Amino acid sequence: MALRPLIAICGTTGVGKSKLAIEIAQHIAKQEAWEGAEIINADAMQVYAGMDVITNKVTESEMQGIKHHLMGFRQPGEQYVVGQWVQDAIKIISDIHCANKIPIVVGGTSYWIQHLLFPNRLSNEKITDKKGPQAAVMSEELARSFRTLPPELQDLFNSFPKQPPLASVDPEQSLSLHRLLSTLDDRVGARWHWKDTRKVHRSLCIIRETGRKASEMISNQSENTVVARYRALCLWPYAKPAVLHPRLNSRVDTMITRGLLDEVRALQHIAISDRQTVTDESSADYTLGIYQSIGYREFHGCISSPVPSDDAFNVAVENMKISTRQYAKRQVSWIRNKLLPAIKAANAIEETVFPYLLDASDVENGWSSNVEDLAMQITDDFLRGKLHLDPLSLSDVAREMLTVEEKATDPLFVLTARRKMICEVCTANKNEPVMVEEGREWEVHTKTRSHKSCDRKAKATFHGYRYGKKIERIDTTESQAS
Ligand SMILES: [Zn+2]
């Protein structure tokens, strides 16, 4: 059966996503082929009731009579996570399709949109949105490798350095990290030179964060081949940081005049009165859900203080602006580093998800020409099943942002890339092994003067070593011949 159509609108705050969704819904309503369109909220904070300023909800009048789903239906303190949202959204989308309407999913939580578009990817991931930099629970396979580590490497794993060391400054720790990686996940370890401490460190970070080896993630990925749940048009209104940041700053100022502080007080009140009345069996957690929203976090302390101070208030305003910018940055990097690669992977099998970036840098004067008109044209093409605009040709910024490089941290890439091999001949000090990439680089290396000179000095046989075990004898005449 052909996949049903869905329009998703993702991107940062302050680029007009909600407005665009309503415009598209109105546009579709005018077409004979469809009964109209309905909007499904994909913003993790807008699912909560009240707190309209903090969560930046569209107003009733802005909705223009378009039905909005999954908005403001959860109580503050209730936890509502990606898996629940995906289930709820699927049900509503199915109803919308049955009514011969088009579902438009819109929101800044691209993480949710991604899991809606691509099923079967949740089982292997953290279902809760609770974040933490701590090491994740280890898979059995990783735990087995962990137990084989010598105590000093277990210590290194547990007191893991935040920053990678410099190989030239601290060769000992650099090599230890490489040994740690090679023991935990030999295939990934073999990919990096021990002096490439940044990559070794990054790979170890991934192992710590996911609790898995890259090789495990590969087998999980092949079990869950990325197949889209819908035929989806993915619109991404985007503004460059230089224009977005001032816009986000003035948004924060507007929020404060619109009553952000009252909402923070109301949230505090809910948390306090609930704590007093509910003694047990409470599922509410006042560190989660809306209590994580930008605005609450920053103003919570400043409002609770018995002595109100202008300085504390100004600091809170500045912090909220910083948090908002940082959030926007994370939103963009999620789209580029997670969503776009997932789309690419799904499209490798069959082209079903179509990403388009719309330049929303000039919302005052450029909205209709750069965003609205283009979005309507693309929507029409998409609904007719004939998309002919090349997404990369729309603008320079579209080309730049939609082009995603193959990432070194992608486990697939890591495992298919060439391995670094220790050149036993050139390694004089086993605490600082000489490593060379297999393939062409290795061939070139073996012809270099320095390698040949080391080779001459070496005897016909010598003692080599590798991590963990000593290799008794390596016949150099044989390795030369191959
Ligand atoms: Zn060599």
Image (tube, rainbow, N blue to C red):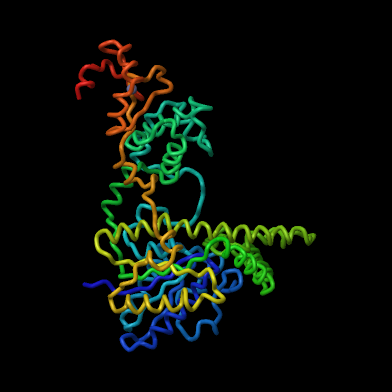
The residue nearer to you, when weighing 394 against 435, is 394
Question: Is residue 256 rendered to the left or right of residue 461?
Answer: right
Side of 323 where 27 appears, left or right: left
Residue that lies at the very extreme toward the front in this rendered image: 449
Q: Which of 164 and 83 is in front in this view?
A: 164
Which residue lies at the image location 39% right of the left edge and 23% below the top edge?
Answer: 433
Which residue sits at x=25%, y=17%?
A: 476
Quadrant of res 451:
top left
Q: In which quarter of the image is the C terminus?
A: top left
Residue 430, image x and y in percent?
40, 19
* Residue 44 in sight from this viewpoint: no
- Picture quadrant where residue 122 is located: bottom left
Q: Which residue is drawn at 42% across and 26% down?
A: 150
Q: How many labels does the image show?
A: 0
Apparent side of residue 344 relative to residue 324 in the rendered image (left or right): left
Q: Toward which corner of the image does residue 102 lie, by quadrant?
A: bottom left
- Percent across and percent down for residue 309 are 79, 60
Above or below, 175 relative to 80: above
Ligand 1 position by quadrant? top left
In the rendered image, which quarter contains the N terminus?
bottom left
Q: Residue at x 38, y 48 (%)?
A: 407
Report whether residue 190 is seen.
Answer: yes
> Does residue 289 appear left or right of residue 221 in this picture?
right
Q: Which of 247 and 42 is in front in this view?
A: 247
Query: Where residue 129 sits: x, y (%)?
Result: 48, 57
Image vertical order of residue 401 relative to residue 182, above or below: below
Q: Pinpoint residue 461: horizontal percent, then vertical percent.
A: 26, 12
